[in-house]
Image (cartoon, rainbow, N blue to C red):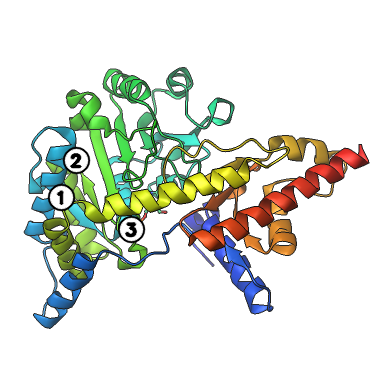
Amino acid sequence: MLAQRMSSFSTSGTAKARVAAKAAAAAGRQIIDLSAGEIWCDPPEALRAGAIAAIERGINRYTDTIGIDELREAIAERLSTVTAKPWQADEVAVTAGGKQALFNAAMAILNPGDEVIIPAPYWSTFPAQVQLAGATPVFVETRANGYVPLIKDIRAAVTPATRAIIVNTPGNPTGAVFGRALLGGITELAIRRNLWIIFDECYGSFAYPPARHENIVSTLPQVRSRTLLVGSFSKSLALTGWRLGYLAGPAEVIAAARALQSHTTSNPNVIAQYAVLAHLKNDGGRFEQTLRARLSEARTRGLDILSRLAQVPRPLAQGGFYFYLDLSALLANKLQRGTFADADDIVRLLIERAGVAAVSGTAFGDPAGIRLSYGVPLEALERGLSAVVDALNHMSAGQRSAA
Ligand code: PLP
């Protein structure tokens, strides 16, 4: 007998994709896994050295609930550079990944009955956490506009119950990057309608020209008092399993996050904290630059292969490390014949026919999309995407010959 709240959400779709890929691999199939939300390479050297040094120095105990001062100061310093305005350590809470930062934010600002605007397709944790806080997600469709919301659609979704809007740029799963004009429109709306902005920039290191990632606070400094920045080292430093991220915002929200965290997880992993601190002090941004260059190369190679798709538009993939394919045209035709009805079916067929694991858009509120990660070694990416293109083109050809 589970609590009522458990009926409103289930295990994340990306976790389901991993399970399906593992099951196929366990049955002896060679599977190329393009479903993971992480990058294959090792974390930075300075960071690994920092972790080893911390262990050898006997750093084993609890720290301050929201992280050691030096790390919070280093993050504040980074934010000061990015936003060109000073940030202090009491405006930063270090968390067990961006996920905990988002959870703390939701718990700290949402009341039951509140509404939260979320552009769709969305990362599935956003609505799940809004619901955990007793609030209601309100989705704004972006599919007709290259997965970037129109400000008029966001405006139309605001009601007297709206409390916050979640902005995730570069976005998971779509790779869409919000431009400065849109961010400006959102800040203006938030100020006028007295809304919070939860700004998730966990993929902020990865935007590919001409797209450019902008921190929303740098577009209009007045918005800072109503913005909660969510950052993560999971993706930018390729250390998803180490669990380190942060929440930055007004000191009263950070104090609330501290209180909440003190009763949930306490401090984030101490070795990870010292490791990231060593990285921030010693690396000077070199690792992130190298990683961006590698991903950019993977993106270019991947887009080249995907340009052979017959009935699926080449994705824009402006940021992050995902190709998000719009299968609407493929599904629209085939629907009449009933071999496959939605992206779940296509994902299943891709495992069977192409030996590739992808994530279905149904996990992201979009039954017509699939997500393929390019955070994998180039050789696997090329083989995987070529197999996906062949399989999808075969499905399109099947339709045409049956027509
Ligand atoms: N935000 C977005 C949009 C994500 O895609 C993820 C992870 O996939 C996160 C936040 C949280 O990542 P983590 O908790 O590993 O820092």
Disc 2: which residue: 249
Residue 228, placed above or below residue 31 = above
Q: Residue at x 75, y 46 (%)?
A: 393
Q: How crowded is mark 3: few (under 14 residues within 10 Å), some or many (20 or more)?
A: many
Numbered label attached to residue 234 = 3
1 or 2: tag closer to the N-terminus: 1
Residue 364: tell me if it is visible.
no
Looking at the picture, which amino acid does disc 1 mark? Ile
Q: Nearer the viewer, residue 86 or 50?
A: 50
3 or 2: tag closer to the N-terminus: 3
Q: Which of 305 and 46 is in front in this view?
A: 305
Looking at the picture, which amino acid does disc 3 mark? Ser
Disc 1: which residue: 75
Residue 322 percent coordinates (x, y): 49, 48
Labels 3, 2: front one: 3
Looking at the picture, which amino acid does disc 2 mark? Gly
What is the C-alpha distance between the residues marked 3 and 2? 20 Å
Mark 3 in CB contact with mark 2 (< 8 angstroms): no
